[in-house]
Amino acid sequence: MYEPRTFLDKLFLVIKGLAMGAANKVPGVSGGIVAFVGGFYEEFIYSLQKINLKAFKLLFNGRFRSFYRYVNGQFLGLLVFGMLVSYFSVSKILDYFLERNELFVWASFFGMILGSIYFISKDFEHWNKKTLPAGILGLIVGVSISFLSPAKENDNLWFIFLCGMISVSGMTLPGLSGSFILILLGNYVLLLVDSVNALYDSMAEILRGDFSFVKNDERLETLKILAVFTTGSATGLVTLSHILTYVLKHYKHITTAVIIGFITGSLGVVWPWKRTIFKTNEAGQVIFDSNGKEIILNYERYLPDFSSSETWWAVFFVIVGILILLGLEWYGNNRKK
């Protein structure tokens, strides 16, 4: 059983949910890192693992209070609430700053990942002939993923379901960015921008008493895609949590070594100083997809120009990102006392 939570603990848990939701939407950043650094990763995984046959039996038998306690309902409820709020608020703010101050946003996340590497590895004293190769393997996979090229958009519903199962790995595996995986699969804009905006617009219209969207075939198709994606995400979340529960129980040190290597390798994904490479035609003109979005091929990374004031501002935001992680560590340590 977990200790009772104070009001401040509950508030911080909602805030962590907000952070996880925002992080999951940023390519290259993993919501699982927030959970790991926030000190609630194992509770998150084990709580998800409780969503099993026994839980459904309690639910269908009308034993709602027992179901709530069994699945650690307060914890999951507050965390998921924060994530949902994030998708319609914090993530939109994040989108705003990514459009206008992309370098500084990436610099902040780069600093947060540096801080998370320190946080995870500082107390890890189990490097040996088994964990060292595991860490190197994680590093190689992380670096390799950062140099892959995105695929084309695909709205086949079976593929959408698969995208949901795979992309949710960013919430359960620190360092593995679910949104970046969606970019590689070609469906980032469709699933994390267009479909979420379609749901937001539909809910806003319903609140105004406007139900005209039910006659909008394009809107309904996008909402159907979002429903299938959400179903796939929920399925993947529960499935992966069961696998990870077993892995963490039997191979905890090896798993931690892989995570450290993987997060270190993922630094290449969020390297702040990079240019976006768009797909172009023979005339050099940028090619747009069916939704009017530029088709991204990859990113060209370059070394910062330290004679530029913008570079030093970016370095400042890297430090801010590191301090945020150190602040989370301080909070976690004080909460234990």
Image (tube, rainbow, N blue to C red):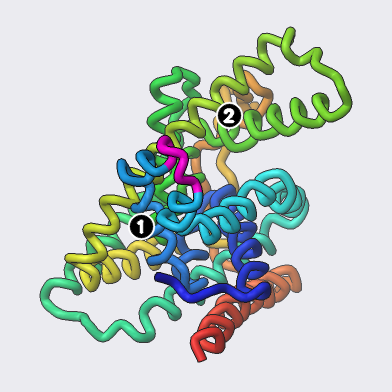
**Residue furthest left as drawn:** 129
**Residue furthest right as drawn:** 208
Residue at 22% over, 60% down: 247
From the image, tell me which residue sits under label 2: 190
Q: Secondary structure at mark 2?
A: helix
From the image, tell me which residue sits under label 1: 143
- Label count reads 2
Q: Nearer the viewer, residue 102 or 69?
A: 69
The magenta-colored residue range is: 59-64
Q: Residues within 10 Å of mark 2 (few under 14, many from 20)?
A: many
Residue 274 in view (yes/no): no
**Residue furthest bottom as drawn:** 337
Residue at 51% over, 34% down: 230
Q: Nearer the viewer, residue 118 or 210?
A: 210
Sooner in the amino-acid sequence: mark 2 or mark 1: 1
Residue at 69% over, 30% down: 199
Residue 160, percent across and down? Answer: 45, 26
Tag 2: residue type? Leu
Image quarter hosting the N terminus: bottom left
Q: Which mark is residue 16?
A: none
Q: Is residue 301 above or below residue 295?
A: below
Quadrant of residue 117 within the rendered picture: bottom left
Residue 71 in view (yes/no): yes
Residue 100, percent across and down? Answer: 77, 52
Tag 1: residue type? Val
